[in-house]
Amino acid sequence: MSRSAQKFHRSLLAVAVLGASLSLSVQAEELRLLTWGGYAPQEVIDQFEKETGIEVKVTKSNNEDMISKLRATRGAGYDLVQPSQDRINGAQKEYRIYKPIDLSKLETDHFIASMLDATKKNTSVDGKVYGVPHIWGTSGLIANSSQQNLSFNDLCSDDFKGKVSYRLKRPTLIGFAFAMGEDPFAAYNDQKKYAEILGRVEQKLIQCKDNVKAYWSGGDALINLLRSGEVTLAMGWDAGGWKLHKETGKINFVAPKSGALGWIDTFALPAKGKNDEAAYKWINFVMQPEIAAKITDSAGNFTASVGAENYVSKALSNSYKISYNQASLDNIKWYPPVPAGLEQLEGKTLDRIKAAQ
Amino acid sequence: MSVTPDLECRGISKFYGDFQAVNDISFSVPPGSFFSILGPSGCGKTSLLRMLAGFSEPDTGEILIKGNPVAGIPPNKRPVNMVFQHLALFPMMNVGDNIAYGLKRRKVSPQEQRRRVADVLERIGLPGIEKKSVDQLSGGQKQRVAIARCLILEPALLLLDEPLGALDLKLREQMKIELKTLQQTFGTTFVYITHDQSEAMVMSDQVAVMNHGRFEQVGSPQTLYYKPETPFVAGFVGNNNRLRGQVIEAGNGSVKVSTESGQIFHTTSTTHLQQDTPVDLFLRPEAIRIDRESDSLWQNCIKGRIDNILFDGGNSQLLVRDTASPTQLTVALPQTDEYQNLRQGEIIKLGWNSKQSIAFRAG
Amino acid sequence: MLRFSGKNLSFYLLLTPLLLTLVLLVILPQLDMLIVSLRERISYGEYTFSLLHYQEFVNEPFYWNTFLRTAVMSIMATLITLLLAFPIAWYIAKIAQGRNKSLIFLACLIPFWVSELVRTYGWMILLRESGVISVFLQWSGLASGPVEMLYNDITVMTGLVYASMLFMVVPLVSTLEGMDDSLVEAAYDLGASTFTVIRTVILPYAMPGVISGCIVVFMLTLGNYLTPTLLGGKDSLWFTEQIFTQFITRFNWEQGAAFGVLLLSLSSLIVWLGLKLSGQSFKKAVAS
């Protein structure tokens, strides 16, 4: 072997060793978190890193994006993800992108029991649990008025003509279905009935398309529209409404008459996650009431952590109290897991609404 | 004047900012003649040509074509066509479409177009190449097609902007003759600009020598060669030895000049020169006789040593240095057999008559 | 026996990266798309071969119309871009000198220093009801109330043309710069009017640049996602939006892949038709 060739082989070896050690160290020190904006504030990350020495890398995302990303890599690339509880079951059956959660590694005392049980039930596949609750919130109305007695139907009323915004996504269809007196969740397993309901909602939404200023696609876009006054009534998340309430003192979240739509974002482990231990550590860490309150202040939504509300900022709990009373809290419609095939139906409905002139 | 000239310019000037490109030029070109404007680059000849074509207007003066003033008439309405330096054949059209371009603009019927294109191709000696693309033509063929494209319109004047500049030497020599022949067969008046004196001399009936925006002299090639009126013409047209000196004896048309290195030469002059006037003496290499032994009597005689023989076939020259002074003269070397054995270092005698040199007041 | 001479070897070595990119980044993904588009989901993780998703495109007028609208808008945007870019390209190539030339070129380039998203949001800030222009119009008394200039086809068109300008100007400038000015003068001298000079000399000469610019702009516009979606608002219907929706929000990769394949083939068909109609060859356009 010539000298230069020898040298070349040695450097190749060196690179290989270096690369291997690098990837090892990465594996040991890193938690790759795929989550929603605000769910992992820097303050909490810093504290976690200080206590455990694990570095947290956050990628911001949403439900559809999380599932698409995991589907494309068959569950690789992240160590912990936070999809909504109703989106786990179907995705797991279809694409096998998650691994079961070992509940013994979690301090389950920190979770509000009823929420934990509901989530466990909704995210189970073949008797294994794939998700535990983290943050919950609702979709309802955000109104630029002190009117409390509003319904999703008001999005189609002449009072708000050209000043309305909502998303062209499934919560809108479901919200309108409830407002029209239907119970879409009850029809989840009866596709024919569900299609019928969708048909009526479609008609209604096409009719009142003129009312719409723009369909919003991101929370920031919606907040901009409301803040500038270009939109005065919108369907949106409670957190957005409370943020605007804190800013303006006027715009606020309103639970609609037919009930706000409740969602729970969970923790789930991607099938090919490399650092489950770190993931469990993170879950246990953020479920401590003091930490959970910090996340609530950052995300604007409440967590499934017991006692966290005692640490939450005054302004937020104030806005929350204006939006909700016990009756409207009891009236929240929680999303059950979505059976396969419904999204196809909903998709076409949404396409047709979009295309209608 | 009995015949209206095809082109007449009266007092034309053109300014670019402070720079005067063309300075008060007047001339006329009789019908059917080949008129060249000869000058170094930057002398204003292109500016002048573009004014004739209509691409720019003179600041002062008047241009008349066939007796009619053309001020304000744009190029596409002037009875004048131009062959461009790089010919400007349209690369996306075939030869036939190139030549018919002007006819099409005049709304000539397609049959008539075809007939006239075939006819003009015949006359330039390239029959039947209508369908060829421009890229397939040789340099000389392109040249002729570019000229045919203009001549088919039967212009009063054909302007040519150094069209031979891009050709290699051999082809250029050949095209000189062809251009002249074409001009004679078509009988169109050509106005040709060039910086190459040989092109101008070979082809033209009349040559205007232009320098610094002015015409120095207008005349037949022979006149310019034998009777230059200014030192610039003497230096620019043909080759010349230039010797600096002083008038020591002024006579009637003939003067005696003492050069800087002390030789005394008899020469002629076109103007009256006072004694002691500093002058430039011009002497053509081909006007100098070479003598080896005999003591023929020339009005001017020097003895010199051959410094160098610049062999170039029929254009061969000798560089000869005066034995008594540092003066070096270029001498044409005739290709007759008595001079074939001249060697470097040989001492020879040179002689010429006074009529063959000319002195101008040094400028 | 296969023997590599030195020259041959270096040729293959040089070719390898190109081939690898082509195969790995272009051909394989497209093939995968084609395969995905041809299967139908039976149940969880079970698929079978089917043309269902193509039938869906044909049977659902909504998809068809969206595609047609996208194609027509893209063609219009291409033509408008050409009309606007030609004088600019002419100015850059033939009239502007030195500093001016680079300045104008820079002006065409500047929009590309920020991402498409930022550029589009820039338009939104200007045009929205509470935006700069609306406020200015009200301030100056030209409008009595807020003016909404977003969310219509004209705005979408403006955004598309704006985003495409550079890709039209560059090939036009490079062909026009190659043109000898004396061609124009010669045509003029031979009796052509200004309009005729443009029609018979400048346009035919610039044709390869026009074609390659048009192909690039058409493809970019057709494949644009952000501009039509953000500026078009509730009535924006763009085919790429459909593909995005199918892939990302509906998890219907099969339908999305079918749309992708259809977009590729239909746009290729349109380009081919355009080339046929203008009597140009793809080879020439690419070579320019």
Image: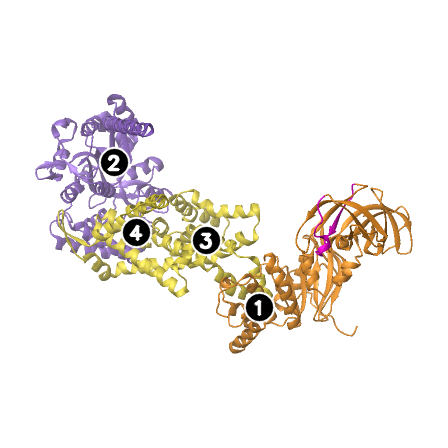
Chain colours: A purple, B orange, C yellow
Mark 3 to mark 1: distance in Å? 31 Å
Q: Which mark is residue C98?
A: none
Same-chain check, marks 3 and 1: no
- Residue A188 spot, x, y in % from top left: 13, 49
Magenta region, residue range: B326-344
Mark 2 to mark 1: distance in Å? 75 Å
Q: In this view, does A219 lie to the left or right of C112?
A: left
Any magenta on residue C64?
Answer: no
Judged from the image, the secondary structure of the residue bearing numbered disc 2 is: strand
Image marks 4 and 2: residues in contact by CB distance under 8 Å: no
Asked if one can make out residue A334 in the rendered structure from this viewpoint, the answer is no
Q: Tell me the amino acid under the disc marked 1.
A: Arg
User: Which-is-in-front pick, marks 2 and 3?
Assistant: 3
- Residue A24 spot, x, y in % from top left: 24, 27
What chain does mark 1 sit on?
A: B
Sequence order check, earlier mark of 4 and 3: 3
User: Which-is-in-front pick, marks 1 and 4?
Assistant: 1
The residue lying furthest to the left in this view is A127
Image marks 1 and 4: residues in contact by CB distance under 8 Å: no
When the figure is inspected, residue A35 is found, relative to residue C184, above or below; the finding is: above
- Residue B51 spot, x, y in % from top left: 67, 61
Q: Residue C241 carries which label?
A: 4
In what quadrant of the picture does the C terminus of chain C appear? bottom left
Disc 2 target residue: A35
Instruction: Name the residue at 8% across, 39% down.
Output: A126
| Mark 4 Cα shell of 10 Å, populated few (<14), some (14-19), many (≥20) | some
Give whichever of B142, A303 is nearer the camera: B142
| Mark 1 Cα shell of 10 Å, populated few (<14), some (14-19), many (≥20) | many
Q: In this view, does B129 lie to the left or right of A158?
A: right
